[in-house]
Amino acid sequence: MSLAEMILGEGDLSADRLVAANINPHTGLATDYLNHFNEVVMMLEMLPAMPECAEEVLEWQPLSYEQHFEASNFAEKNLAIEAFHAAPAAVRRALRDVVATLNTAVCEKQGRLRDAADIAPLADAIARETADEIKPLIATASGIIHGHLDPAETVETDSQAEIDALFA
């Protein structure tokens, strides 16, 4: 069966198998993907106390959902990728939109760190911005993964505020 023919809740993507693999059976998504962002957030928040964390922040690269699982040690990584492809298109789109914003926010901070002769003056601001900007985006992505988005109600939006209103 090709990825295009996989259906959540059926066959290899049965609800029981997805739940056992820590994949949401309704959305087809796994929270393990958020570890990719949580790791860089931790490093960004540690900058004021540990400026040497900047090196690890600068090594971070955006990864798509599929790329994350292909490179991960997640026990059911192939199942996670199959379930992602079987997930409702609106759910995948919502996650990809939030991830694009997350990637942009992290890359912007990387750029500022890269350009700085001394990161000490930036460290507090970057840590604060991480808490104010990036953590709420991770929470939004978590909400999507956990099914707090009704695909039937998804609309195209141009602003983060409109996306956030869907989760209020």
Image (cartoon, rainbow, N blue to C red):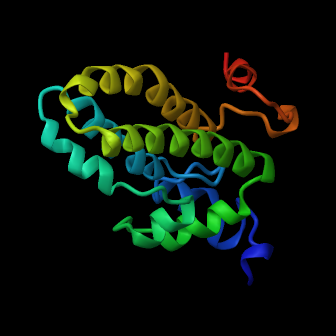
Q: Within the image, what quadrant is residue 10 found in?
A: bottom right
Residue in the foreground of this view, choosing between 59 and 82: 59
Residue in the foreground of this view, choosing between 132 and 70: 132
Q: Is residue 30 above or below residue 3?
A: above
Q: Residue at x 58, y 31 (%)?
A: 140
Q: Is residue 109 left or right of residue 78?
A: left
Residue 79: x %, y % from top left: 55, 69
Q: Residue at x 59, y 52 (%)?
A: 29
The N terminus sits in image quarter: bottom right
Q: Residue at x 74, y 71 (%)?
A: 6
Residue in the foreground of this view, choosing between 110 and 101: 110
Residue 163: x %, y % from top left: 72, 27
Give the farthest residue toward the front.
117
Residue in the foreground of this view, choosing between 77 and 104: 104
Q: Is residue 17 above or below residue 78?
A: above
Q: How many marks?
A: 0
Q: Is residue 100 left or right of residue 119?
A: right
